[in-house]
Amino acid sequence: MAKILLLQFDTDPGCAAHREALSALGATLVEAEPRWPAFFDVLNKERPDIVVVSLGAIPSHGREAARYIKDGFNTRNLPVFLTDVPAKDIDKCRKSAPTAVIVERKDLHDAVYKKLMENLAGKLS
């Protein structure tokens, strides 16, 4: 079964919506706050297939978490999705984690589902 790591703060306005959208995918959902180094410990322990980072509560923490993941030797190839990115932070996100996919909350389920299917197809071929 696929595993998704959701990095968000409980105070994030989109917290419940993110959880609901990702839970509907039927994958194992693991949550942690995007605080260094705790999130990286969870990442290494859980070994998710996909990471979703919400920037809804504290955007700087989310950006840094995405950067650490994309710079990490063992984590740099993980698909990372950034959601609830404030318009003023889009350029900062593209610089700190250029391969992360920025997705609106309403499109989160479909974008992650598509990537899960691509991953599955790659494993079957």
Image (cartoon, rainbow, N blue to C red):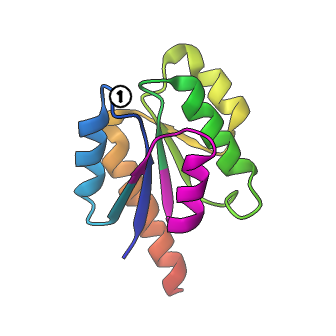
Residue 114 placement, left or right of 23? right
Q: Nearer the viewer, residue 59 or 90?
A: 59
Give the secondary structure at mark 1.
loop
Question: Taking the image as drawn, is residue 47 in sight?
Answer: no
- Type of residue at label 1? Asp
Q: Does the magenta stretch include residue 39?
A: yes
Residue 99 placement (x, y as % from top left): 66, 45
Residue 18 placement, left or right of 37? left
Taking 92 as reference, is 121 above or below it?
A: below
Q: Kindly indicate the quadrant of the structure image that contains residue 95.
A: top right
Taking 45 as reference, is 66 above or below it?
A: above
Tell how many labels.
1
User: How dense is the environment of label 1, judged by Cα within 10 Å: few (below 14), some, or many (20 and up)?
Assistant: some
Residue 106 placement, left or right of 57? left
User: Would you name the residue on which mark 1 appears?
Assistant: 12
Residue 16 placement (x, y as % from top left): 24, 38
Q: Which of 88 and 45 is in front in this view?
A: 45
Q: Residue at 60% across / 63% down in the picture?
A: 44
Q: Residue at 54% across / 86% down in the picture?
A: 125
Q: Residue at 59% across / 57% down in the picture?
A: 41
Q: From this viewpoint, which residue is outermost toward the top?
A: 88
Q: Does the magenta stretch include residue 108?
A: no
* Magenta stretch in the rendered image: 31-51
Q: Residue at 69% across / 45% down in the picture?
A: 68
Q: Kindly indicate the quadrant of the structure image that contains residue 117.
A: bottom left
Q: Which quadrant would the N terminus be assigned to in this image?
A: bottom left
Residue 20 placement (x, y as % from top left): 22, 47
Question: Taking the image as drawn, is residue 1 in sight?
Answer: yes
Residue 106 placement (x, y as % from top left): 30, 35
